[in-house]
Image (cartoon, rainbow, N blue to C red):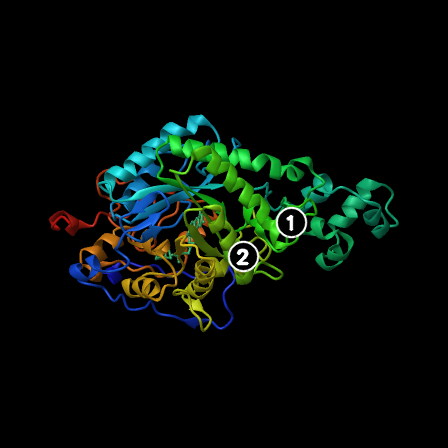
Amino acid sequence: MAATEGRTRCYHRRDVWRPPERIKHVAPDGGWPTAEQAAASRWFSPIELGPLRLRHRTWVPAMVPWRATEEGLVTDDVLAWYERFARGRPGAIVVEATGIRDIPSGPLLRIGHDRFVPGLRELVDTVHAASEGHTRVLVQIIDFLRIRRRPEPAKFFARFLELTDAHRAACPDAADDDEVRARLASMPDQMLARVLSARDYEALQFGFRERVTDTAHPHIRELPQVLPGLFADAAARAQAAGFDGVELHYAHAYTMASFLSARNDRDDGYGGDLDGRVRLPLEVFAAVRARVGEDFCVGCRFLAEEAIEGGSTVEDAKVFARRFAEAGMDFLSLSRGGKFEDAKPPKIGWAAYPYTGPSGYECMPTTLSDARGPFGRAVPAATRIRQAVRAAGLTTPIVVAGGICSFAQAEGILARGDADIVGAARQSIADPDWFRKVWLGRGDEVRRCLFTNYCEALDQKHKQVTCQLWDREGLDEPDVALAHDGRRRLVAPQWLTERVTKRR
Ligand SMILES: Cc1cc2nc3c(=O)[nH]c(=O)nc-3n(C[C@H](O)[C@H](O)[C@H](O)COP(=O)(O)O)c2cc1C
Ligand code: SF4
């Protein structure tokens, strides 16, 4: 079946920011090679990430598909999800953001205790077997701070808000604190924005969210003492489970990215200037390296740009990249944006999602865009960051992803020296076989991503992630696993012609 023949459903989202220009972009031509051209190409050539050799420079970046148990354990659905990518034989798959603490986190994979190791070992074995040893598998390890759902206003004023004299002064006739709470609850938003502190107003509109700068709280103040050990323990478990490497998650809206952020003004040596902001990420890496040794691949994913007001820029990222490379990281994977600071307010009862504002758009750009468009949007910043690393005499491989969905794009990026490895997240969901199809000279069979973010909307709701191009296909096939809603298949249908393909 031709790539574009997949049944599509009209899909428009109103709950996320879009560039006001609303220019409709069309996916670039695939530039599909013959099998011989693919074999001679840069994208399908090997590369070393420190001690780890990848057969190809093709890469599936981390993506959370919401398939773990509520306790964070690997399920059959997790195995099936990664097995499906592995059959496409990318050079590497990075397993989704996996929590390093032993705390309940919903159906997100966890690695914060030895009990998680057997399931993760099965996951590694599944990827190695399904790719017939072609694909290396890394795991992205993450720490995140507490975030609450947006509260019912009545509950917020009755229970959560700590009353201050400023609140009492705003309701001078109130007989007692209960009446102050009741009056506040009936105030219009505009007035509340003046009466409540900025943090309280944010907690009302978005739900309470901890920050790395909340150093009045001991558990936040002590993050620099606690996190190196937690990351090192998690990396050691990844090693014990047989992973080929770990990716330290220093990107997007989470703890480590918040330390790197230009908005981090901690005054304890772990914030402020660039040295202060990069200090904990370097200390975490040092602890991980000390634990797993030189023979285990360790890299990180961090932001080429935060893409928020007052956030880190490409210039900051150039410094971070050099420091990470000098410290001995084996690869640097770049992402963009994905911050809470510019997210849209969630509905009451929902948690804020850091991919709903302009920075979220930078992370997962869609076809309705500005003049730059979504395709390869991340490349110019990656080029500058790689140049900075090379100018310092360092050869650390740089991974770029973002709107890459064709051979021509990937090969151009490598030929120009913009990056060393080219990843594709959503294109790999749309067609997990696509790397193999291109390798076999059958690129015209690739089912091409529409870049409309139906999958990401499911992620936002913590629903099992699927693709609109295939999740209603062949629902009546025997043994097809369905999502909890019973209406969507959980993995892409098999590529039928694969069976008759000559093995390479
Ligand atoms: C459903 C979904 C889940 C994602 N989860 C993660 C994640 O766990 N960690 C991460 O670093 N990025 C995550 N991302 C971002 C992707 O890795 C990637 O950076 C982004 O989709 C842009 O690349 P693309 O244009 O090739 O899709 C996720 C993206 C999607 C669509
Ligand atoms: S992978 Fe996501 S963005 Fe691409 S077509 Fe499928 S649902 Fe749409």
Q: Secondary structure at mark 1?
A: loop
Q: What x and y, as percent, mark residue 79? A: 32, 37
Dot 1 crowding, Cα within 10 Å, few <14, some 14–19, many 20+ = many
Q: Residue at x 44, y 71 (%)?
A: 372
Q: Is residue 77 left or right of residue 203?
A: left
Ligand 2 falls in quadrant: bottom left
Q: What x and y, as percent, mark residue 311? A: 59, 59
What's the residue type where badge 1 is placed?
Gly
Q: What x and y, as percent, mark residue 88? A: 25, 49
Point out the residue furthest to the top here.
Answer: 115
257 up-or-down from 126: above or below: below
Residue 393 or residue 19, whichever sits in front: 393
Q: Is residue 440 left or right of residue 61?
A: left
Whether label 2 lies within 8 Å of ligand 1 gets the answer no
Q: What x and y, as percent, mark residue 301? A: 46, 50
Dot 2 crowding, Cα within 10 Å, few <14, some 14–19, many 20+ = some
What's the residue type where badge 2 is placed?
Val
Q: Residue at x 86, y 46 (%)?
A: 174
From the image, tell me which residue sits under label 2: 319
115 up-or-down from 146: above or below: above
From the image, tell me which residue sits under label 1: 271
Q: Residue at x 26, y 62 (%)?
A: 4
Give the quadrant of the N terminus.
Answer: bottom left
Q: Kindly report the distance in space between the C-alpha atoms of the residues bearing marks 1 and 2.
A: 15 Å
Residue 178 or residue 313, whichever sits in front: 313
Q: Is residue 206 left or right of residue 367?
A: right
Report which quarter residue 240 is drawn in: top left
Residue 452 or residue 109, whichever sits in front: 109
Q: Is residue 136 visible?
A: yes
